[in-house]
Amino acid sequence: MSIEHPTQSSSIVDVLETVLDKGVVIAGDVKVNLADVELLTIKIRLIIASVDKAKEIGMDWWETDPYLSSKAANQNQKELEEENNQLKKRIEQLEEKME
C-alpha cells in the first residue's frame, strides 16, 4: 500500500520559475494635478525576468552602462583616452598654424 501526499499545484518555486522564464511587466502612471492642472507625471515601468529572457527580448543595457559593467567602463575609458589624444593633436596643429 502506497501513501500519497497531496501536492500544491503551484509552489513558490514553480511561480518564481515561471516568472523568470516568461517575465512579468508592471506598468503604471502617477499624475499630480492641482485645480485641473497637471503638475507632474511619473511613468513607472518594471520588468521582472531572468537575464537570459531579458537579453532575448533585447534588454541588455546593463552590459553597456559603465557604472554597472567593468567591461563597459574600460571601453568608455579607452574611448575617452582616444578622444583626448585626438584633441591634443588638434591643439598642436592649431598652435603650429598660429606661429
Image: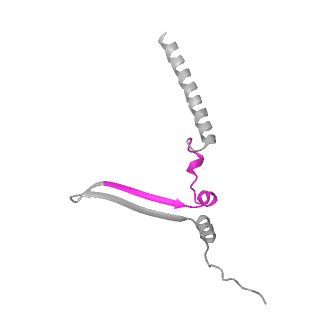
Name the residue at 62% across, 36% down. Answer: 74
Residue 15 coordinates in the image, percent (x, y): 59, 70
Q: In this view, does 54 lie above or below 4?
A: above
85 vs 43, nearest the viewer:
43
Left or right of 37 in this view: 3:
right
Name the residue at 55% across, 42% down. Answer: 67
Magenta residues (range): 40-66
In this view, the residue farthest toward the bottom is 1
Name the residue at 55% across, 26% down. Answer: 84
Magenta region includes residue 44 = yes
Q: How many labels does the image show?
A: 0
Magenta region includes residue 92 = no
Residue 66 coordinates in the image, percent (x, y): 56, 41
Q: Is residue 65 above or below residue 30?
A: above
Residue 36 coordinates in the image, percent (x, y): 22, 60
Residue 32: which quarter of the image?
A: bottom left
